[in-house]
Amino acid sequence: MYSRRHFTLVEHQSLYSVKGNKPIYNDGHLGLPEKTFSELEQFILQNPDDAALFLEPSYLKPFGKTLKARQFVGVIETRSGIVIEILPKIAKNISHEETRRIFIKMLRHLRNSPFKNFSMAHLKTEKLHLLEIFIFMFCEELTALIQKGIRSNYITKEENATFLKGKLKLAEHIRRNLADKSHFFIQHDEYLQNRIENRIIRTAIEFLYRKSSDTANKKRLLEFLFVFNDIEAVSDPEYAFKLVKIDRQIKDYQLILQWCSFFLNNESFTTFRGSNIAFALLFDMNRVFENYVAHCLKRDFPGLDIEAQVKKEHLIEYPERKFLLMPDLKIGASIIADTKWKMLDSSKPHYGISQSDIYQMYAYGKKYPDTREIHLIYPQVETFPNLQNRELHFEKDKLKLTIFPFSCKEGRIEGYGRVLERVFNVSCSGTSNKERTNTQEYIEGLNMTEEGSKEQEEFFLS
């Protein structure tokens, strides 16, 4: 907890209602004042298709009605001023600070995001919650831009002046100054910093100054307001962004404008309705996880053709192609891999693997004809079943399905290099000696024992 108005929740934990004005923690769950809980509940009702993706109405003894955090993580600010930070569930025994660092590292590889160029060397996650971390990142990028220099441009101005300069607007001059010979209504160009890009930045600075509660961040934002003192804010950011044209002159603005759009247009989350939520920056962990896994595999195995978001085959071919099949990863011609942000658990039926996911993998295998193996990649958690050492076959001696645990902390699938070497019969550069040793144990485990065959049979029949 950073203040009386900021609270942290971990994915799969719940919010519930308590009497009084003081939020309380109870076994990881967060009790909110009735008014705040009602604001969030109304928000869910007004946005049933979107909001339930990250706060699912539920019931939990002894709390009664709850809102369970799931899939989307980030920051929500209610109208009553309470800020709720939702962190991803990455591992059981790591701190919130470490979880933030891992999450920020994953965000750096999110496509079309402003995080990719940020250095984490000086980031103090123990002192800042997610919103303040994002504001800190914005400040770092804006500092770099100011050091390079804020761009000016010729701005057309119209004014009723006491001097004649530029072009006399005759019709307006007559209308205004028929009885006043001392003024001239003129149009002229001035070389000013009040260009649209700077006005958007000024708007973002004002917005973040109102949102921030961190002393250091607020101090930096106040300094930026002095730098941008002569620049006007925009009243409609969405329209203002349409006027921006990135060219060589303002190439340095590209990343800071991404940050401005991130904050002003809520680009991390789908549009929501209603007046119960003041602010929301939320990220779909399915997308974050997918992008992170793709980056790590391309980094570790640069010699292989790894394609993300493949868009080639359709489920229906005739009379017209419909229902696009879009696997997350295609590795060479032989492997289709899909990532799933779900926490597998050996105590759950099918270990928590959904039947729809298996159907989806089967469709991939049938419609991508060169596929020899299907890989399902899940986050590595403490409850992960001992299934990664087992091959599952859709049909005997044919298409093979293997489940892999991906360590978000380490950024890799242990032993995966050896698996790829086996499939493609090539040496995969980037595979460490330790990984090769561990992978040899993995390969040996693929020779199914009688006990393993029984576990595989129970998996499909249960």
Image: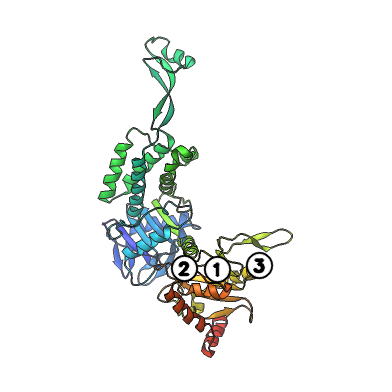
Q: Which of the marked residues, 3 or 1, is nearer the chain's N terminus?
A: 1
Say which of marks 1 and 2 sits in front: 2
Label 1 secondary element: strand
Residue 71, located in which quarter of the rendered image? bottom left
C-alpha span from label 2 to label 3: 31 Å
Earlier-in-chain disc, 1 versus 2: 1
Q: Are marks 1 and 2 in contact (CB under 8 Å)?
A: no
Q: Quadrant of residue 2?
A: bottom left
Distance between mark 3 and mark 1 Cα atoms:
14 Å
Residue at which label 1 appears: 337
Quadrant (top left, top right, bottom left, bottom right) of the C terminus:
bottom right
Which residue: 43% across, 28% down? 155
Residue that sits furthest to the right in the current view:
319
Identify which residue is drawn at 36% across, 34% down.
Answer: 231
Residue 353: % across, % down: 51, 74
> Does any portion of residue 207 appear in the rendered image?
no
Q: Can you say which quadrant of the picture contains the N terminus?
A: bottom left
The outermost residue toward the bottom is 450
Badge 1: how crowded within 10 Å, few (<14), some, or many (20+)? many
**Percent of width and height locating residue 233:** 38, 36
The reply to whether the C-beta atoms of the residues labelled 2 and 3 are less than 8 Å apart is: no
What is the secondary structure assignment of the residue under circle 3? helix
Provide the residue designation for mark 2.
430
Identify the amino acid type marked 2.
Answer: Gly
Q: Is residue 12 left or right of residue 332?
A: left
What amino acid type is highlighted by mark number 1? Ala
Tag 3 residue: 367
Query: How packed is label 2: few (under 14 Cα within 10 Å), some, or many (20 or more)?
Result: few
